[in-house]
């Protein structure tokens, strides 16, 4: 593979070594995983989370009492989720990793498909809010001390641009991995410096590439348009995505104090930390009448 940014041509062996070294370095320099951690990997069964589980399984040191577990959320999306859940089950059983699956129906009383009737254009925001909560509950139930997600470089850069396009400075400055309330399990993103393309190549070389269906709601997602725009820029101007992430860090440093609340209150319904009376999940549940 030709790495446009570094100008290196890598063979199969060196490509895999390079990915492993960079992921290990991200984990080490940001102290993402420490001895005795119980790391819950959010495993949808798609490319990113499959690569994340495989890499952690290959890289985590033995003898430090670190345990990996996988958690899968079944949102209830017909024609899509069943295939990815099957893929997640096959992977965890091959690697011998404990696997927990939890559904929106168990937690919120119905499927995402039902919640979205007539609200399809808001699919990803609603799904994102509920899934984040579901992951935290699943990780807590599994006794996790860290929650690892498969967000890659493209995802992170897309989020920066989306928040800029929406004019959402608080969200741009919020570091989702940091929880000053201490009520949530810390979230880690070990693949945040690896591109989507590199993840695809890594999976192909590991014989773990599966053709899976795409979520039917992606056609409504703003992210899809941003993704196309950013890949074009990255191709013409290698390094664009990394520069966007650097910009976010600088904006965060200068603006976080003035746009984020000094301390969070608690949701009056569920007690989770939030900035208003109700957290986003309870607001949604009120809207749905659940
Ligand atoms: Fe949820 Fe949107 Fe992802 Fe589908 S594409 S799983 S609706 S966030
Ligand atoms: Zn709440």
Image: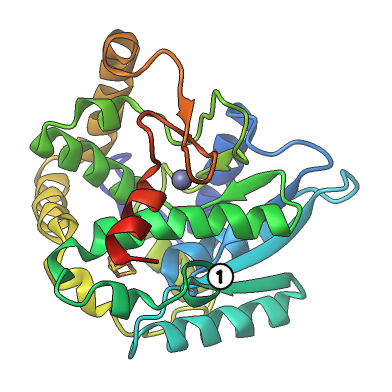
Q: Which residue matches tag 1?
A: 72
148 left or right of 197 in image: right
Residue placed most toward the observer, 94 or 75: 75
Classify 10 Å Cα crowding around label 1: few (below 14), some (14-19), many (20 and above): many
265 to 98, vertically: above or below: above
Determine the residue positioned at 57% across, 52% down: 136
54 left or right of 112 in image: right
Q: Point out the image quarter for the C terminus.
A: bottom left
Determine the residue positioned at 91% across, 47% down: 63
Which x, y percent locates residue 82?
Answer: 45, 88
At mark 1, the secondary structure is strand
Q: Quadrant of residue 212?
A: bottom left
Which x, y percent locates residue 5?
Answer: 28, 41
Residue placed most toward the observer, 169 or 31: 169
Q: Point out the image quarter for the N terminus.
A: bottom left
Determine the residue positioned at 62% across, 60% down: 138
Residue placed most toward the observer, 284 or 37: 284
Residue placed most toward the observer, 238 or 164: 164
**Residue 164 shows in the view:** yes
Q: Quadrant of residue 89?
A: bottom right
Color scheme of the displayed model: rainbow
Determine the residue positioned at 13% across, 52% down: 226
245 to 10, vertically: above or below: above
């Amino acid at each position: 593979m030709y790495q446009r940014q570094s100008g290196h041509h890598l063979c199969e062996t060196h490509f895999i070594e390079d990915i492993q070294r960079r992921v290990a370095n991200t984990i080490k320099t940001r102290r993402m995983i420490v001895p005795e951690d119980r790391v819950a990997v959010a495993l949808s069964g798609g490319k990113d989370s499959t690569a994340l589980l495989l890499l952690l399984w290959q890289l985590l040191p033995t003898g430090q009492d670190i345990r990996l577990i996988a958690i899968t959320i079944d949102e209830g999306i017909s024609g899509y989720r069943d295939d990815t859940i099957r893929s997640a089950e096959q992977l965890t059983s091959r690697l011998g990793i404990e696997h927990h699956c939890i559904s929106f129906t168990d937690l919120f009383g119905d499927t995402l498909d039902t919640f979205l009737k007539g609200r399809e254009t808001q699919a990803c925001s609603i799904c994102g809010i509920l899934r984040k909560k579901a992951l935290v509950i699943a990780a807590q139930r599994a006794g996790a001390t860290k929650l690892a997600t498969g967000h890659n470089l493209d995802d992170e850069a897309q989020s920066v641009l989306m928040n800029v396009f929406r004019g959402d400075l608080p969200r741009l400055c919020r570091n989702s991995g940091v929880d000053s309330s201490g009520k949530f399990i810390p979230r880690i993103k070990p693949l945040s410096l690896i591109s989507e393309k590199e993840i695809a190549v890594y999976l192909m070389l590991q014989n773990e590439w599966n053709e899976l269906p795409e979520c039917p709601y992606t056609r409504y997602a703003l992210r899809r348009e941003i993704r196309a725009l950013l890949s074009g820029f990255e191709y013409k101007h290698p390094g664009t995505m990394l520069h966007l992430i650097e910009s976010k860090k600088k904006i965060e440093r200068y603006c976080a104090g003035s746009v984020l609340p000094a301390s969070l209150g608690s949701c009056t319904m569920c007690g989770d930390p939030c900035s208003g009376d109700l957290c986003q999940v309870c607001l949604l549940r009120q809207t749905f009448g659940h």
